Amino acid sequence: TLHRLFEGTGQTATAHLRTMRIAAAQRLLSNLTDIPIESVAREVGFANDTHFYRSFRSVTGITPGEYRHLARQGTADLRSRLDQSPE
């Protein structure tokens, strides 16, 4: 029944959940710069670091490490980089 809620939206329940997890990871990477990226991955529900890195890059176009680095530099750099993302 959960999957039926997403019929006609152009997005699957799994893809929506992944997008939500990546958004949560982005907040953590920006705000908690002292915790390892692998801990962020587990905190947002990824059991496998490799899957997290691939998913993050698929959604944002950059790696979690690049995202954190850009977030430290400021939001203007981050926004311009994310505007070039593949999705």
Image (tube, rainbow, N blue to C red):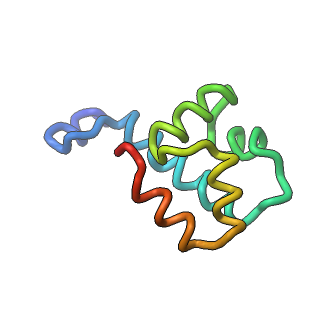
Tell whether 15 sits left or right of 70. Answer: left
Q: Position of residue 29 (x, y in %)?
A: 69, 56
User: Relative to the observer, which residue lies in front, 74 or 40?
Assistant: 74
* Horizontal arrangement in the rendering, residue 66 relative to residue 56 (left or right): right
Compared with residue 12, is residue 19 higher up or lower down, i.e. above or below? Answer: below
Q: Position of residue 13 (x, y in %)?
A: 35, 37
The residue lying at 64 percent from left, 73 percent from top is 74
Placement of the C terminus among the 4 image quadrants: top left
Count of numbered badges drawn on the protein: 0
Q: Residue at x 22, y 35 (%)?
A: 4
Q: Residue 59: where, in percent of width, then height?
A: 45, 43
Extreme residue in the right direction: 34
Looking at this view, is 42 or 71 the one in front? 71
Residue name at image x 55 percent, y 31 percent: 54
Residue drawn at (76%, 38%) of the image: 38
**Residue furthest left in the image:** 8
Quadrant where the N terminus is found in the figure: top left
Q: Position of residue 42 (x, y in %)?
A: 71, 39
